[in-house]
Image (cartoon, rainbow, N blue to C red):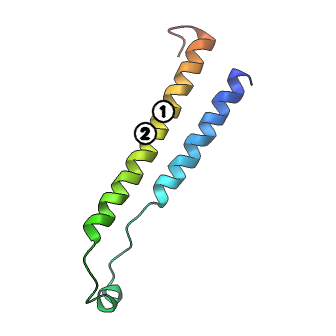
Amino acid sequence: MTYQEEITNEQSAIAALRTRLKNIRLPSRTINWQHQNVGAPRNSVQQRLETKRQKKKINNKIVYSQNKIISLRESIFGEGGL
């Protein structure tokens, strides 16, 4: 695989990860939801923590891909060729 193909693959992976990041949300707490779940246990803190973990994991993958692209470009153009 050439450098350009690898860069293109990483850029498409970044785009896919950003799309996944936008889709991670907590369920909305509408008035209807509150009435239906009056006696339900409170686990919103756990949901928030899990959402943060998922977002952090995806952000780390995005940073890794961006660093890989920078590394590939440096290997093509030399040290200061960005």
Residue type, mark 2 in image: Asn
Q: Disc 2 versus disc 1: distance between alpha carbons?
A: 6 Å
Residue displayed at 49% across by 60% down: 23
User: Depth check: 72 or 40 in front?
Assistant: 40
**Residue neighbourhood size for the residue with mark 2, other residues' Cα within 10 Å, grouped as few (<14), some (14–19), many (≥20):** few
Residue displayed at 44% across by 60% down: 24
| Residue 7 placement: quadrant | top right
Tell me residue 77's x, y (percent): 60, 11
| Residue 2 placement: quadrant | top right
Tell me residue 14's x, y (percent): 55, 41
Tell me residue 52's x, y (percent): 34, 54
Residue type, mark 1 in image: Tyr
**Residue neighbourhood size for the residue with mark 1, other residues' Cα within 10 Å, grouped as few (<14), some (14–19), many (≥20):** some
Q: Is residue 1 above or below residue 34?
A: above
| Residue 42 placement: quadrant | bottom left
- Residue position for label 2: 60
Where disc 2 sits, the SS reads helix
Where disc 1 sits, the SS reads helix
Q: Which residue is most to the front?
A: 41
Instruction: State the mark number for residue 50.
Output: none
